[in-house]
Image (cartoon, rainbow, N blue to C red):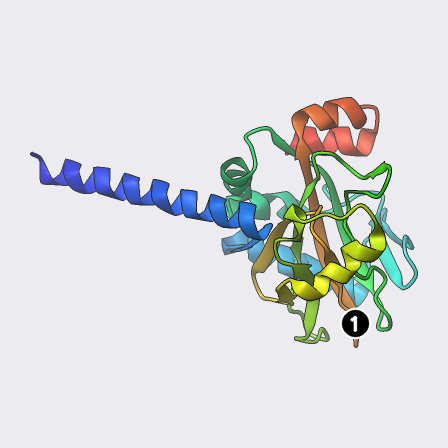
């Protein structure tokens, strides 16, 4: 038997096994980490640094959504090409295909600046049902990246209650109380690491000791986008670009 073919088959088999492990872990834990790479990462970090220190360029502005936070408006996907390029160079679409489904689309991107003080969004799920459904079903999946910039602390930025997307109570009191029984993953600002997670899991923004900035990518199944967001220009344009 041709040795090169044997090695090629083994390499392919090992790659498939590795993907299966990643898929299993994502299903079980509800999150995984990855890394932005190359030129697109460098440009993305530089763009976020400029936004953090100098503010948006002409035609864009900061607008408050939650107390103590500012979001980039009118959109992110047209501010700089690195916001989309970084996803593709890091093979995020492949991660989504492998771990969730082949029909995932990017329907929203946010850049958010927050001030020091109390958390603007403590423990919560983006999708839940305490008598009536709130959020997207199936839930959205998000990629969040907190760049480690000059002037940003190394402290934890985001907490994830590991596996909580598979445990759900019919009321908020018991749901939040169960967090104490589950392991917690803490994500800190990084030069390149992002976190991908199922937004039905319990997660919390950590209170900042200083200002910080992050980019948030939100993904849904194509059928959900078609049913809910095709009439909203910002989302329709972003899906088309993605």
Residue drawn where x is 87% and y is 52% of the image: 61
Q: Residue furthest left?
A: 1
Looking at the picture, how far across and down is residue 185, in whole percent? 62, 64
- 121 displayed left or right of 145: right
Location of residue 138 (image quadrant)? top right
**Is residue 78 visible to us here?**
no
Q: Is residue 42 left or right of residue 8?
A: right
Q: Residue at x 84, y 43 (%)?
A: 130
x, y percent for residue 2? 9, 35
Q: 193 or 23: which is nearer to us?
A: 23
Point out residue 1 in the picture as x, y percentages from the top left corner.
Answer: 7, 34
**At x 30% / y 45%, what residue is drawn?**
14
Q: What residue would you read off at disc 1?
A: 208
Other-residue count near label 1 (Cα within 10 Å), few / some / many at <14 / 14–19 / ≥20: some
Q: In the picture provided, is 193 more to the left or to the right than 76?
A: left
Say which element carries label 1.
loop
At x 80% / y 45%, what residue is drawn? 170
Query: In the rendered image of this protein, does residue 140 appear above or below residue 64?
Result: above
Residue nearest the viewer, comparing 103 with 124 = 124
Question: Which part of the image, by quadrant, shows the C terminus?
Answer: top right
How many numbered marks, from 0 up?
Answer: 1
Foreground of the two, 175 or 53: 175
Image height check: is 32 above or below 127? below
């Amino acid at each position: 038997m041709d040795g090169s073919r044997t090695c090629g088959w083994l390499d392919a088999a090992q790659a498939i096994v590795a993907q299966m492990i990643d898929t299993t872990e994502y299903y079980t834990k509800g999150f995984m980490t990855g890394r932005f790479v190359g030129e697109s990462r460098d440009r993305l970090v530089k763009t976020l640094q400029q936004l953090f220190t100098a503010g948006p360029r002409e035609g864009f502005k900061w607008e408050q959504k939650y107390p103590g936070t500012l979001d980039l408006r009118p959109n992110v996907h047209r501010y700089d090409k690195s916001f989309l390029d970084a996803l593709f160079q890091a093979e995020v679409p492949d991660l989504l295909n492998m771990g969730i489904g082949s029909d995932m689309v990017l329907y929203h991107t946010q850049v958010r600046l927050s001030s020091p003080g109390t958390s603007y969004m403590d423990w919560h799920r983006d999708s839940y049902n305490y008598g009536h459904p709130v959020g997207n079903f199936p839930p959205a999946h998000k990629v969040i990246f907190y760049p480690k910039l000059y002037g940003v602390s190394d402290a934890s930025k985001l907490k994830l209650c590991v596996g909580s997307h598979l445990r759900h109570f019919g009321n908020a009191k018991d749901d939040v109380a169960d967090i104490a029984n589950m392991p917690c993953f803490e994500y800190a600002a990084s030069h390149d690491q992002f976190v991908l997670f199922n937004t039905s899991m319990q997660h919390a923004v950590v209170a900042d000791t200083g200002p910080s900035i992050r980019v948030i990518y939100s993904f849904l199944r194509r059928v959900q986008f078609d049913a809910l967001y095709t009439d909203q220009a910002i989302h329709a344009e972003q899906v088309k670009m993605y």
